[in-house]
């Protein structure tokens, strides 16, 4: 065993720093959500992998269990309150509790502001912002009943801190998540529930693959990133592991920007 592993075992135990905890990750069938689910499982958490495709969630769970982790797939449309309650109930039935919620589910729609359809606005807000609200309410109620606290991590975006063109609904939804995070942190602190947000920059995921496939667009992104590379899901997963850990017990209501320095230009 290397010295690094020995230090890790001494600090966190041989089963990982998240051992004994149960996490729900929404939007976990691919991209950032999948990366978060894999990282939490590797750290020892039992993970409820949730998204709109049960089959794709099962594939992520298979990947986790093959590596010796614990995972359970749940189909859930986060904009539907009944499905959200069923998701939390399924987590409790399977693993006995909920300790961590990662609100990652989100959609992106491109439309010029003056041409934006009402349906576009509603769909983006329902998934990105309303979904965050519904999942947080359901999970926080369970955490409060348990009486041992919990961690909620909301995935927002640097688009919630500064506007980008042709995605007004997305900008507004992500800004709303930041405000909601602060409100939740205030009201849930008495139940020992920490609520924080992570604001990714450009991350290489299925959501951004078409943009990054265009070399001119990709180079435009890179010119704005001092670190000189596009982010990967593991960059966000590492931030989630910190905010969901005991080391972050005194951090609540904050936004951690993970963007390679892009925000420095905004």
Image (tube, rainbow, N blue to C red):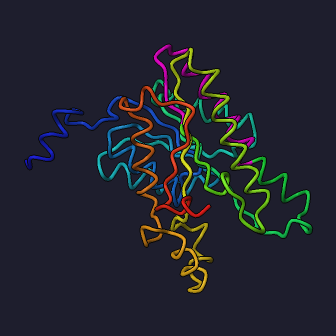
Q: Is residue 79 above or below residue 111?
A: above
Q: Position of residue 101 (x, y in %)?
A: 53, 36
Single out the residue that lies furthest toward the front: 265
* Direction from residue 19 to residue 240 in the image, left or right: right
Q: Position of residue 36 (x, y in %)?
A: 45, 50
Q: Name the residue located 32 percent from the left edge and 33 percent from the top edge.
A: 19
Q: Is residue 140 above or below residue 10?
A: above
Q: Name the residue located 59 percent from the left edge and 51 percent from the top edge.
A: 27
Q: Name the residue located 62 percent from the left edge and 61 percent from the top edge.
A: 266
Q: Which residues are magenta?
A: 127-152
Q: Is residue 146 above or below residue 30?
A: above
Question: Which of the 4 image quadrants contains residue 46?
Answer: top left
Question: Which of the 4 image quadrants contains residue 263?
Answer: bottom right
* Direction from residue 1 to residue 30 in the image, left or right: right
Q: Position of residue 178 (x, y in %)?
A: 65, 42
* Magenta-span inclusion, residue 132: yes
Q: Position of residue 49 (x, y in %)?
A: 51, 46
Main secondary structure type of the part rendered in magenta: helix
* Magenta-span inclusion, residue 101: no
How many dots with numbers?
0
Q: Name the residue located 80 percent from the left edge and 54 percent from the top edge.
A: 123
């Amino acid at each position: 065993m290397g010295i690094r592993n020995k230090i890790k075992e001494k600090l966190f135990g041989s089963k990982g720093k998240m051992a004994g905890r149960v996490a729900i990750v929404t939007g976990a069938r691919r991209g950032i959500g999948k990366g978060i689910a894999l990282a939490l499982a590797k750290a020892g958490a039992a993970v409820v992998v949730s998204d709109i495709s049960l089959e794709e969630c099962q594939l992520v769970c298979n990947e986790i269990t093959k590596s010796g982790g614990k995972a359970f797939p749940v189909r859930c449309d986060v904009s539907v309150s009944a499905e959200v309650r069923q998701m939390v109930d399924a987590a409790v039935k399977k693993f006995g509790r909920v300790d961590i919620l990662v609100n990652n589910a989100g959609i992106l729609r491109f439309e010029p502001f003056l041409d934006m359809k009402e349906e576009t606005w509603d769909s983006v807000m329902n998934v990105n912002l309303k979904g965050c609200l519904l999942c947080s309410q359901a999970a926080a109620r369970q955490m409060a009943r348990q009486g041992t606290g919990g961690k909620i991590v909301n995935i927002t975006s640097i688009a919630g801190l500064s506007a980008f063109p042709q995605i007004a609904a997305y900008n507004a939804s992500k800004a709303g998540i930041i405000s909601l995070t602060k409100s939740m942190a205030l009201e849930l602190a008495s139940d020992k529930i920490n609520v924080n947000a992570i604001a990714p920059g450009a991350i290489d995921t299925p959501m951004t693959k078409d943009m990054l496939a265009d070399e001119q667009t990709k180079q435009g992104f890179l010119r704005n990133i001092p670190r000189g590379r596009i982010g990967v899901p593991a960059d966000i997963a590492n931030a989630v592991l910190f905010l969901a850990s005991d080391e972050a017990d005194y951090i609540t209501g904050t936004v951690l920007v993970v963007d390679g320095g892009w925000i420095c230009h905004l």
